[in-house]
Amino acid sequence: MATQRKGGTLDKNNKYDRQLRLWGDHGQSSLETARVCLINASATGTEILKNLILPGIGSFTILDGNKVQGEDVGNNFFLMADSIGKSRAQVTTELLSELNEDVSGDFLEENVDDLLQKNPAFFTSFTTVIATQLPERTLLNLGKVLWSVNIPLLVCRCYGFIGYLRVVIKEHTIIESHPDNFHEDLRLDYPFKGLKDFCDSLNLEAMDKKDHSHTPWLVLLYKYLQVWEEQHGGKMPKNFKEKNAFKELIRQGVRKNEHGVPEDEENFDEAIKSVNSSLHSTAIPSEIKSLFEDPACLKLNSESKNFWIMVRALKEFTETDGNGFLPLRGSIPDMTADSERYIQLQTVYREQAELDSVAVAGHVHALLHNIGRDEPLNPHTVRDSQEGSISDSEIKTFCRNSAFLTVLRTRSLEEEYSAETANTEELGRHVMMEEEEDASDEGDDTVLYILLRAVDRFFTEYTRYPGYFNNTVEADIPKLKACLTKLIHDWGLTAGIKDDYIQEMCRYGASELHTVSAFMGGVAAQEVIKLVTGQFVPINNTFIYNGQRQTSTTIKL
């Protein structure tokens, strides 16, 4: 194994400014300590690594026992004509290392099958393993090794105009899932003491024109909710009719000038617009309740992940201090208001969120003590670096995102590839859709996965891919069709796939097009970053790209 040395230091805040806005300093820190292994420096593999080296992964190792051939130079931008005959692992490592001097690059010129047999522990030293262009048997052996130690495996493959990606991981926990759509946690239906005291201290009637038109709309909603609930037996407006009536009640609060014309008070307009999104029931999401009942949460031990210890602490918090609610998120949206009162309102929410976080931390430290993680019961004596401890900053991040916690558990490759445990129901549905004459294009991309599986069967039987040699394209069509028919039969399905697809697969001849590789390189690198940083939700579990129609689909297999 050879190593390309790290370069000098740079101002990383400037260098990585844009991505820091996405996953923060802690996400970047996780990225910079990640160790990634790439199996096969193919066009697809180098495109994936390129998109990981540029944002600054800690180190990478390329495992490839092949020499550079002419076809590699034709589709891989990280290989040149004078590289032909040289170690593909070495040449690509040297050129990829030039992209970012903060990243260390290693290579190992060895056959993956030999290494799996001689030293399978080699693969368990990495944060994530990426496998490209591997045959089925090798892939299953590799998947078994990594599955046993819960190391993520990303399988990526480009075959003609087809892109294929599979995420394989026994369990992946996500605290910062960054949902696209969510309600603000304002607790207007169950206002906490700090919010009540602040809002009750403000008298709308006694305010002058400036203060009245710059009162935060959140306060306005609280005030008029009190009026509404007095008139409706303590109940909030729930349906469309009631919310419209509530909006009218707020609208009547707009002051009028001496001519009886309503003043231009933008904060009241904002309050009316926010009724539908802000007046929702505060409750624990069903997904979080299911985590509370997960065996990993209920049966903690000294080997439990920090995530599950905090989930258990969260469960205990909701049953005691939280009175059935999750910790307050502690943030409020922007709004028309004077700076003084907006900051005061912001402080009210932050202080309550801090109190909730401290309460959860108390449960965390007690649980750590109970399971023998040598955690002192006094959280103020804990240092972030203490072995076995969970830092206060980690707990605060957890509490802030407690409504969006996600656990990803994919199926193993062994389960997917076995005829007894394959997801035949889903596969059969797509085969039937494809067979129907009036079938729409929707969902057809899953058929490409079935064809890739048939291609692997062909390789197992003939030790080459269909159409790999120009003079065998026509002869390989019936052979591939026979492999496909047997595969579908093994799944217990009776439908078939159109001959046009089979002919096209033979015409591809296992070619790896750079345009498809470049696209899949971006997709795969994105999934690696999700896994490494523990942020955003990775795909579950298979992604298929159709380069001919420029469409894609995600399916659980």
Image (cartoon, grey):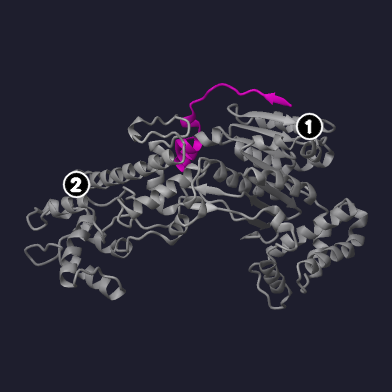
Residue 18: x %, y % from top left: 48, 39
- Depth check, mark 2 against mark 1: the one in front is 1
The kind of residue tagged 1 is: Glu
Q: Residue at x 55, y 32 (%)?
A: 32
Q: Does any portion of residue 307 appear in the rendered image? A: yes
Mark 2 Cα-neighbour bin, 10 Å: few <14, some 14–19, many ≥20: some
Q: Does any portion of residue 326 appear in the rendered image? A: no
In the image, taking residue 443 as reference, residue 309 lies left or right, namely: left
**Observer-nearest of 512 and 328:** 328
The CA distance from mark 2 to mark 1 is 65 Å
Residue 459: x %, y % from top left: 85, 53
Q: Residue at x 57, y 49 (%)?
A: 171
Residue numbers of the magenta segment: 1-28
**Observer-nearest of 531 and 554:** 531
Residue 312: x %, y % from top left: 43, 49
The N terminus appears in which quarter of the rendering?
top right
Mark 2: secondary structure: helix
Residue 26: x %, y % from top left: 46, 36
In the image, taking residue 310 as reference, residue 213 lies left or right, namely: left
- Relative to 54, is 449 above or below? below
In the image, taking residue 58 as reference, residue 273 lies left or right, namely: left
Mark 1 Cα-neighbour bin, 10 Å: few <14, some 14–19, many ≥20: some
The C terminus appears in which quarter of the rendering?
bottom right
The kind of residue tagged 2 is: Arg
In the image, taking residue 456 as reference, residue 276 lies left or right, namely: left
Query: Which label is found at residue 341?
Result: 2
Tag 2 near tag 1, CB within 8 Å? no
Query: Which label is found at residue 109?
Result: 1
Q: Residue at x 78, y 51 (%)?
A: 136
Mark 1: secondary structure: loop
Residue 183 occupies quadrant: bottom left
Q: Residue at x 34, y 41 (%)?
A: 362
